Amino acid sequence: MPGATYDTSALLAAERNDRRMWAIHAELLADRVVPTVPAPVLAQAWRGGSRQARLAQLLVMCVVEPMTEQQARSIGVLAGVARHSEIIDVAVAEGAIRRADVVVTSDAGEVGAIGAAVTADIRIIPI
């Protein structure tokens, strides 16, 4: 199985204890896939406090990928080519394309459209 990237909707689903999200996460881990969470995705989802205990539990089993200057530039270029202003979506798509990851999301249309703008087929696992 390829790698996996979680978008903000995946993190929020885990936070609200969505059974499908946790099943997807368990399956990925069973297949020895450590999901990637782009740092901007974490920033969008994280508010702190005890109400995010489930999200914190999920993050322990993920890699949070920092955004380098080079990635920021690549994301900016991709946003321009895709004509998409939501940088979080573009960061998810850019990382998934670069790593050949599947994307776990509830918003397949946005991520897929970004990939299509550069003729990249981004595979989606819907939640």
Image (cartoon, grey):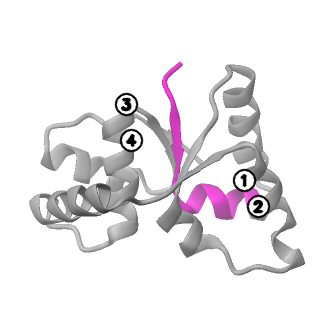
Residue displayed at 81% across by 70% down: 52
Asked if disc 4 and disc 2 are in contact, CB closer than 8 Å, the reply is no
Q: Which residue is mark 2?
A: 55
- The amino acid sitting under disc 2 is Leu
Q: Which residue is mark 3?
A: 100
Q: Position of residue 17 (x, y in %)?
A: 81, 57
Q: Badge 4: few (under 14), some or many (20 or more) residues near its Cα, within 10 Å?
A: many
Asked if disc 1 and disc 4 are in contact, CB closer than 8 Å, the reply is no
Closer to us: 40 or 17: 40
Q: Earlier in the sequence, mark 1 or mark 4?
A: 1
Between the residue at mark 4 and the residue at mark 2, the CA separation in whole angstroms equals 21 Å
- The amino acid sitting under disc 4 is Ala
Q: Position of residue 23 (x, y in %)?
A: 75, 37
Between the residue at mark 2 and the residue at mark 3, the CA separation in whole angstroms equals 25 Å
Residue displayed at 70% across by 46% down: 21
Quarter occupied by residue 18: bottom right
Q: Earlier in the sequence, mark 1 or mark 3?
A: 1
Q: Is residue 89 left or right of residue 58?
A: left
Q: Position of residue 76 (x, y in %)?
A: 21, 65
Q: Which mark is residue 96?
A: 4
- The amino acid sitting under disc 1 is Leu
- Local SS, label 3: loop
Q: Which mark is residue 59?
A: 1
Residue range in magenta is: 1-14
Q: Earlier in the sequence, mark 4 or mark 2?
A: 2
Q: Position of residue 73 (x, y in %)?
A: 22, 62
Residue displayed at 33% across by 69% down: 87
Quarter occupied by residue 91: bottom left
- Local SS, label 2: helix
